[in-house]
């Protein structure tokens, strides 16, 4: 279970930063009418150049061993949001201003990305509990523990940073996170997990990728980079039973260590949890969804950081199960 006694690092935006971000976001939304407009995506980089140096500094990527921080200072009015949707596909333009705010925050940290096979290629995903999905290992679940994992771990082009913006969380449902840099693993366990032993398969949010005909490729769980260990971890979609016992034992010890250093973050409306997807895994505690318009609602964005060297070169040869990542500047 996560260790709630260890608080997540917080970066606070001041009132001027909040006004600056929301004003630019409202301007972009007014020009382009929709937060999903390709023209709006193309305008993100020029818009970011208009933002203050102080905002650029506050929105730098994760830079501590915690592997995450909570960005605090945005203010969302619950009464203006409308009800929590029952499925991502029914969101429409609800919370569209916050889609654009999140895209601006993402663009200051790197290059926003999307997936052609997930949520219709949207660059901002809506994470809401959905009827019939209560027990699956995706963000649409509710009644089961969402196992700590690397976002889109099956793909070599996965994000370097994951951003989760809280729209609504009346029940104070915690997101969990744990950094590989805070664990204590033996040299033998590290050596085992650097080996390419087991593949990571596409999760249930990628139905087309799950039908891919290519052979699954074993990938390393850990990578010893210049700045320290990084990881690629998704036990719910890793065929552990096919691996040798020595490797499985090391994997179990890694799982236990991640649980030991885990923190539980109960996001408030306007909070943005920024997770370094190379350093930290994330998940969610179970809860009972009501489907009455008041359930937890997050918006999610994914970011690549150009020039980062936190992954093994062998990833370049992976097929990615046929999934293509879309970049905002090329949209």
Image (tube, rainbow, N blue to C red):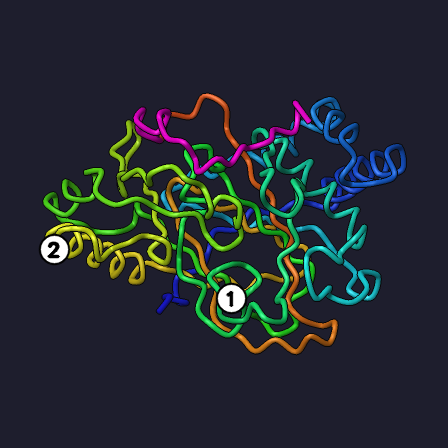
The disc, 1 or 2, on the residue closer to the chain's N-terminal end is: 1
Write down the quadrant of residue 106 in the picture.
Answer: top right
Which percent across, then down, holds residue 76?
A: 75, 57
Q: Quadrant of the C terminus?
A: top right
Which percent across, then down, holds residue 245?
A: 12, 55
Write down the quadrant of residue 215 in the picture.
Answer: top left
Write down the quadrant of residue 53 in the picture.
Answer: top right
Q: Residues within 10 Å of mark 1 (few under 14, many from 20)?
A: some
What element does badge 1 sit on? Answer: strand
Q: Is residue 327 magenta?
A: yes
- Residue 28 visible (yes or no): yes
Q: Is residue 62 above or below residue 81?
A: above
- Residue 160 visible (yes or no): no
Q: Write the residue at 74% across / 72% down.
A: 293
Say the numbered circle drawn on residue 174. 1
Q: Is residue 81 magenta?
A: no
Which percent across, then down, holds residue 87?
A: 68, 62
Q: Is residue 108 above or below residue 190?
A: above
Q: Write the residue at 55% across / 35% down.
A: 303
The residue singled out by tag 2 in the image is 245
Left or right: 165, with 192 as reference point: right
Q: Which residues are magenta?
A: 311-331
Q: Are marks 1 and 2 in contact (CB under 8 Å)?
A: no
Q: Quadrant of the N terminus?
A: bottom left
Along the line of sight, the residue nearer the viewer: 64 or 40: 40
Q: Is residue 305 above or below residue 14?
A: above
Q: Write the residue at 46% across / 61% down.
A: 137
Q: Write the residue at 28% across / 27% down.
A: 226
């Amino acid at each position: 279970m996560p260790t709630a006694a260890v608080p997540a690092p917080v970066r606070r935006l001041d009132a001027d930063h909040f006004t600056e971000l929301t004003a630019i976001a409202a301007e972009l939304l007014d020009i382009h009418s929709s937060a999903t407009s390709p023209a709006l995506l193309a305008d993100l980089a020029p818009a970011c150049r208009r933002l203050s140096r102080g905002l650029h500094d506050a929105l730098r990527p994760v830079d501590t061993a915690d592997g995450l921080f909570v960005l605090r200072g945005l203010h969302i009015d619950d009464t203006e949001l409308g009800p929590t949707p029952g499925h991502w596909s029914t969101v429409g333009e609800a919370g569209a201003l916050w889609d654009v705010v999140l895209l601006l925050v993402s663009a200051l940290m790197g290059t926003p990305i999307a997936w052609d096979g997930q949520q219709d290629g949207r660059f901002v995903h809506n994470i809401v509990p959905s009827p019939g999905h209560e027990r699956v290992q995706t963000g649409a679940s509710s009644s089961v523990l969402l196992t700590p994992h690397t976002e889109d771990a099956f793909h070599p082009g996965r994000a370097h940073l994951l951003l989760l913006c809280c729209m609504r969380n009346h029940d104070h449902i915690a997101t969990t996170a744990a950094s590989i840099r805070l664990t204590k693993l033996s040299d033998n366990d590290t050596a085992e997990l650097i080996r390419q032993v087991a593949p990571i398969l596409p999760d249930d949010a990628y139905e087309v990728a799950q039908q891919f005909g290519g052979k699954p490729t074993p990938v390393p769980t850990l990578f010893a980079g210049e700045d320290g260990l990084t990881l690629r971890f998704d036990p719910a979609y890793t065929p552990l039973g096919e691996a040798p016992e020595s490797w499985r034992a090391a994997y179990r010890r890694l799982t236990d260590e991640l649980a030991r250093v885990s923190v539980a973050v109960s996001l408030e409306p306007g909070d943005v949890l920024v997770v370094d997807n190379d350093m930290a895994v994330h998940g969610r505690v179970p809860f009972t969804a009501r489907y009455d318009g008041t359930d937890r609602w997050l918006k999610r964005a994914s970011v690549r950081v150009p020039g980062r060297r936190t992954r093994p070169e062998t990833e370049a040869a992976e097929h990615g199960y046929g999934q293509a990542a879309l970049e905002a500047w090329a949209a």
